[in-house]
Amino acid sequence: MKAIMSQDLQASHRNSLYLVVALSMIFMTLVLAVQPLFLKGLGLERDNAGFVNANIQVITELVDLLLVGYLGHLSDRFGRIPIMYYGFVISAITAVLTPFSLELGLLFGVNGVAVYYVARIFMSIGSTAVWPQLGTLTGDYSNKQDRPMLLAKVGFMTAFGATLVYAVFMQLPKIIGLTLVMMIAAVTAVAGAWLTRHFLVEKAELTRQEQFPLRQVFDLLRREKDLRLSFLAAFSSRNDMVIIGLFLMTWFIYFSDMLPGVSHAQAAGMAGMVIGFVGFIILVSLPFWGWLIQNFGRVESLTLGMVLSGAGFTGMGLIMNPLSLWTFVPAFFVGLGQAGCLLAPQTLALDLSPAPMRGAVMGAFNTVGCVGIVFFIQIGGFLFDMISPTAPFIFTGLANFVIMAYGLWVLRTGSNDHFAPDPRMDDRQPFDLDLEL
């Protein structure tokens, strides 16, 4: 399929981008959210639940690690849209088969969990072809003046998709069953493929460079300490919502074994409410973060986001009963900080990425994020099983404080982020989604 080439960007294209972002996030979040409950149904016991759930995520992230950087370069050569389209197609096909992992295992004479491992790998390949290109496409659709607010709008739809999954879809297994809930992921992937193919346009000029510009990316990192900070933030904070989604859900499900009258599906629904609350806080605070980044600086906002996120994650260590209302207190700070950690590093990276190699730079940015997810999830799985269910959160919070310290050093030594708003910018409302009816 040929990429659709156009230099004319209309509000309807941005609207389509927002919707595709939401569908992509619904797919990725739902796949992760149902995993502990589905594996519990396959017979996975508490003793190795943390390791197996983390191990599956680590394997998929290793696959992402191998692909995400090169896919970013391919998007510079062939366009973002074709790569996203086929990523959605792969995701949809695999999502239809995943609920039948046990039956497929019996058919081929292998364990159902092993089939699920393979299915998750293929869904991850599809997702890796989609979500990094969405971030790069956002950079293509914006300039340095309006980029923070456009990223805030994209982040709003990202948080909306994740919140919808935990607050609504994860309440459905006890009503319609887990299989039908898992099929929702397939439907969203099909919708994402259709919208991508028919309603998005290419904006960037394609490059003829066949090899990944690794040396140029390293040279850029060596020159720009702000870019180094954004990469470090991606390493530390890209895993935050994965940590919350995976380990908080697992903690709730297995904690319910100690509570009479609380089923696994009910516990998953309660966990979904907490995770949905985190998503809601991200959702409502994103306009503020977009305004803060645009008016007070990328590095300052990134550092503040790390402070709040670190406080929230370490605060999880004080929770003894995850089903108590006290869980919502650190969850509030996680959501508030995560919104800043979602926008500021990506804004910095896009600002400092030369247009002809934007896909490659963002591919490297996302590769570092994948390394961070592998690192934190793998260690978090061992900490969950060996120490306590709260240990992965404390470890993540401490890491965020370390990146915060580096951000303070960048500010003290003189940040290169000297961007000031352009007075010629239009007078649209700061969070108008540009919807065309």
Image (tube, rainbow, N blue to C red):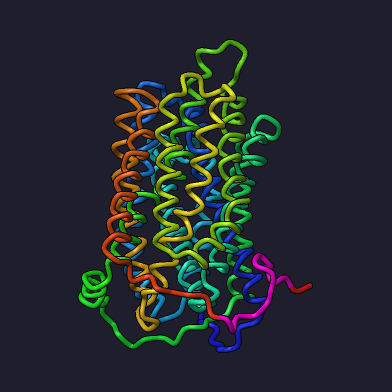
- Which residue is rendered at x = 51% and y = 24% of the image? 322
Name, please, the residue furthest toward the right: 437
> Is residue 160 visible to us here?
yes
231 or 32: which is nearer to us? 231
> Is residue 2 visible to us here?
no
Compared to 161, does 271 lie above or below?
A: above
Q: Main secondary structure of the magenta part?
A: loop
Left or right of 198 in this view: 94: left
Residue 211 image point, x, y percent: 26, 79
99 or 330: which is nearer to us? 330
Residue 199 image point, x, y percent: 64, 75
- Which residue is rendered at x = 66% and y = 65% of the image? 431
Stretch of the chain drawn in magenta: 423-435
Left or right of 344 in this view: 66: left
- Residue 427 part of the magenta segment: yes
Left or right of 80 in this view: 76: left
- Label total for image: 0
The C terminus sits in image quarter = bottom right
156 or 175: which is nearer to us? 156
Which quarter of the picture shows residue 198? bottom right
Residue 298 image point, x, y percent: 43, 64
Residue 350 image point, x, y percent: 42, 71
- Which residue is rendered at x = 36% and y = 37% of the image? 54
Name, please, the residue furthest toward the top: 260
Compared to 87, does 94 lie above or below?
A: above
Compared to 155, does 258 lie above or below?
A: above
- Residue 183 part of the magenta segment: no
Which quarter of the picture shows residue 219? bottom left
- Which residue is rendered at x = 51% and y = 82% of the image? 3
